[in-house]
Structure formats: structure tokens, C-alpha cells
Amino acid sequence: MRLTLTRPDDWHLHLRDGPALGAVLAHTAERFARAIVMPNLKPPVTTTEAAGAYRARILAALPAGASFEPLMTLYLTESTSPAEIERARASGFVHAVKYYPAGATTHSDAGVHDLARLEATLARMEELDLPLLVHGEVTDPAVDTFDREKVFIERVLAGLVRRYPGLRIVFEHITTREAVEFVAAAGARLAATITPQHLLLNRSALFDGGIRPHNYCLPVLKREHHRLALLAAATGGSPKYFLGTDSAPHARGQKETACGCAGIYSSHAAIELYAEAFESVNALSRLEGFASFHGADFYRLARNSATLTLIREAWTPAPSYPFGADVLVPFRAGSPVAWRLAPAGG
Ligand code: NCD
Ligand code: ZN
């Protein structure tokens, strides 16, 4: 069986920098026409100028002949000014601003403690229609890790949506039924991305015969009923949900250790894994909307015109891929993925 789609885009991706960027970029460029590139480098990408320089490094790292457009983002800090928002909007290459609650995830220490300090900046984004991308987890240590998204909706997101009625917001990598319900009930200016791991795994995958660091990401995997709610949302045809892998490569040594980093690498099999998830509920006919149309429409960019073909034929990802001086262990390392990419032009 073959499945041909309009070429998809990845609306949430970590490409890193330097040798790590060179190691992972080809996987994304093979599958996706564009990607929203996360700004959580060390140091973070906080200015339009830095985003432009990062964009140039990404383009320089592309394999010969690849056609891929990086869509850049700014990292919101408590000193992001309205003037920076104006520069971002005028650049044409910055497409959104990313809000990390300080301390919520990898490289988020420069993030925001209190959104109330950013009123003028958020108002400028609202005026200029520059979307805000939200990592939706509270950082309050008193809140159980598995409840941090749900509590974020109550404590932060609901107020944000109310206070800036014109601001377009993407609730990134949603993981709970509560998030699906909140997005579904909100207006069209609130959308959400969903990762392949949250469609395919529940939290038992973290403890499958022993602790599984390569299934650890943030927000952490949740219970099965949440997975089913996400799958229903992704495959239900609503334009509010779109593909965002959150592929987040870390060296094996940073994952297989006493205090391992959060992040799952899925770029090597991203669209194939989504096809598996959609097929599991007989919804392959809805994959193209989720992967290729809804995100472009939300970001007000043209839909892609090229196509990509998948073949229903199992293959097994390598146990690891080179990653700078170390290696990285990909999602499904050493076990089969049901769909494969058709060779280019085939
Ligand atoms: C991301 C990373 O490693 O940069 N990790 C993750 O678990 N998703 C950061 C993030 O998006 O939370
Ligand atoms: Zn991410």
C-alpha cells in the first residue's frame, strides 16, 4: 500500500547547533518542507539578529540539493522588548515567539518567571499578529509532574487567552485530555501541536521492564486515556491540531545517566510514525490535513505543492546515529516502524 501526501511541515522542532545540527538536519529535510525551529540554544536565540544568524547556519548545514525552509522563532525572556517584536515581524523569517516558563525544560533557565512583566511585549505581538508558542507546564515543585500541564491551563493559559483576545497561541506538544478539551472549547486563534510519542506511547513506556530514558521527554508521557484523547483530536479533522514532532536530540551519554535529559529524537522516522498512529484508528485519510494543511493555514503560509509518498513496508531504525563526538539513540531504535519513505521521485 502507498500513501501520497502533500509534503508535510514540522511545526515544532529542535535542530541544535554546530556538529549536532549537521548530524540531524538531513532527517528532517528529507521529510518536511519547513519546520518551526525552537530557539532553546545555549545561549538562547533572543533577538531577530541571532535568529537570522542561526537560520544562515541551518541553511549552510543542509545537504546538497535539499529543499527545506527553517521558520525561525525568538526565545521570550523577561527583557524581550516591543521593539524586538517589531524587528521580528519585519524580518520575514521570524514566525513566532516561544514562551518557556523558567525551569520547565531543557535550556529554559532564561525563560519567563512572570508573564505579567511582559504586558507591552505581548500586546505588540497581538497587534502585529506574531504567534506565541507555549510550553504549557507549571514549574511549581509542589505540583506533581504528571499534573503540570493541567495546572498550567488553570493558572496561566486560561488567563493569557482572556487577556489577549487577538493573540494567536500554539499550545505546544499537548499531552492530556484536559489540554484537548481546553483547545477544543477555545476560539480558532488557539491551536495545538501533538508529537508522535504522545500518540503512540503512554507512561508505562517509561518503565517497560526497567527504566527507559529514551522514552523520557517533557511534558512527560501520560496515562492511556490521555493518549486516546490526543489520538482522537489529531485524527478528528479539526484544523486546531497539527504536526509538531518536538524531536529533541541528546547525546546518548546525556540520556543514559543518573540525571538524564528530557527529549525524544524522532526526526529519522517522523512522518512514518504519525502514519502508524493514524492507521491504528483507521484515519489515514486525515493524516494530510494534520501533517500538511492545518499548520500552514494557522501560520498563514502557503500550503506546500510538492508531495511525499509513504509505503506500508516495515523497516528498522539503526540502534544509534552519529551525533558529534557521541551518538544519539532514536525513537524505535532497533525495532520496526510500519511505514517507510518511498525513494525520492519514486
Ligand atoms: C526539549 C529539548 O531537549 O530541547 N526537550 C523535550 O523533552 N521536549 C525541550 C522542550 O521542548 O521541552
Ligand atoms: Zn520542544
Image: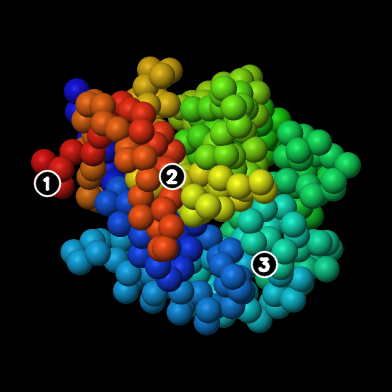
Q: Percent x, y for residue 23? A: 36, 60
Q: Residue at x 32, y 40 (%)?
A: 318
Q: Nearer the viewer, mark 3 or mark 2?
A: 2
Q: Residue at x 27, y 43 (%)?
A: 6
On residue 345, the disc is: 1
Q: Is mark 3 within 8 Å of ligand 1?
A: no
Reply above or below: 61 against 318: below
> What residue is disc 2 on?
329
Q: Amino acid at mark 1?
A: Gly
Q: Percent x, y for residue 235? A: 46, 27
The quarter holding residue 164 reads bottom right
On residue 311, the disc is: none
User: Is 87 on the left-hand or right-hand side of 23?
Assistant: right
Reply above or below: 324 against 343: below
Q: CA distance from mark 2 to mark 1?
A: 29 Å
User: Is 272 on the left-hand or right-hand side of 95?
Assistant: left
Mark before the other along the chain sequence, 3 or 1: 3
Say which element carries label 2.
loop
> What residue is disc 3 on?
76
Q: Residue at x 65, y 42 (%)?
A: 219
Q: Nearer the viewer, mark 2 or mark 1?
A: 2
Say which element carries label 1.
loop
Q: Residue at x 59, y 27 (%)?
A: 210
Say which element carries label 3.
loop
Q: Nearer the viewer, residue 321 or 218?
A: 321
Q: CA distance from mark 3 to mark 1?
A: 41 Å
